[in-house]
Image (spheres, grey):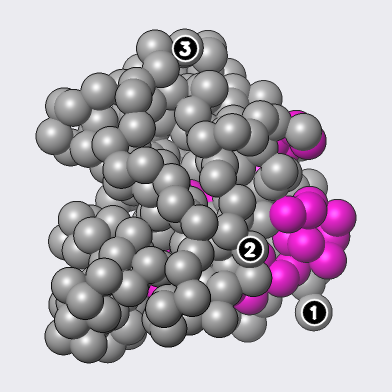
Amino acid sequence: MFNFFLAGEQASSRYHNIPKSLVFTLEAPHTINTAALLGIDSRSCLADTLHFSSSNSSYILCDNTLNNHDSSVMAPFQPYTTKPSTDFFTNYETEINRRECRRVVPMKVLALGLGRTGTASLRTALVELGFSDCYHMMSASVENPPDCLMWSDALAAKYDGVGTFGREQWDQLFGHCQAICDWPCVAFAKELIEAYPEAKVLVTTREVNSWHASTMKTVHWRATEPELKLAAAMGDWAAGMYQPMISSML
């Protein structure tokens, strides 16, 4: 059950020199502020922001005023292939080549709280509120494994300086979504805010020790799982795309 109300004051931020913004939590029941991890000054918030909270997390929707920055298209590193009959890693739902897609609905919400802060429940809530679809790690790991190809491109561009990944590529990757949350999206908070200045920004929080324990048991375990590595090494279709992508986030 979510409670809605309006809140707001003059906002400020250190993040990428944005004069008004942003991302922060209000009356959050937990002590770790994800915004701080992103380098954001979370002392105040813009007027007309939407705040809703649950017993476990606290959320804020805020205006952001970044300008859009286009980037040149980069060539894909790993080509898309259709699923072979030998694949056994996951009962995926689709096998869409996102590199051939485009934006069909406007991006409205960027949920940039870290994974393991209630993002699965948040995804469900956003969809129920009419923000369809909402991108989540499950979108790539289970629902459409070829998404991992573009995520690997994005990670290589940001962290290895290989190629570029900008608004056009983001629109290809989740042009069917009105909202995003969870990993790997949160690794690109700055880039996504720049790409979608019209979107509202939302952050979930969690007590830091609880968050760390949960992350080590789930995200880190998955990224280092021997069985997943073995499936990828054996040439499994989905695992061969998912395992390199998630392990590169460590």
Pick the residue in front: 100 or 120: 100
The disc labelled 3 sits on which kind of residue? Asp
Could one spot residue 233 in this view of the protein? yes
Percent of width and height locating residue 157: 25, 31
Percent of width and height locating residue 194: 48, 23
From the viewer's perspective, is residue 102 above or below residue 49? above
Pick the residue in front: 226 or 193: 226
Could one spot residue 13 in this view of the protein? no
- Relative side of 187 to 4, left or right: left
Where the C terminus falls, by quadrant?
A: bottom left
Front position among marks 1 and 3: 3
From the viewer's perspective, is residue 149 above or below residue 121? above
Task: Give the mark, 2 or 3, whose residue is nearer the N terminus.
Answer: 3
Q: In this figure, which residue is indicated by the disc labeled 2?
A: 94
Q: In this figure, which residue is indicated by the disc labeled 3?
A: 70
Q: Residues within 10 Å of mark 3 (few under 14, many from 20)?
A: few
Number of numbered labels in the structure image: 3
Where disc 2 sits, the SS reads: loop
Q: CA distance from mark 1 to mark 3?
A: 39 Å
Task: Give the mark, 1 or 2, whose residue is nearer the N terminus.
Answer: 1
Q: In this figure, which residue is indicated by the disc labeled 1?
A: 1
Q: Which residues are magenta?
A: 105-133
**Residue 188 is drawn in which quadrant?**
top left
Pick the residue in front: 114 or 63: 114
**Residue 160 is drawn in which quadrant?**
top left
Residue name at image x 26 percent, y 80 percent: 231
Q: Is residue 54 magenta?
A: no
Percent of width and height locating residue 235: 26, 70
Residue name at image x 77 percent, y 33 percent: 104
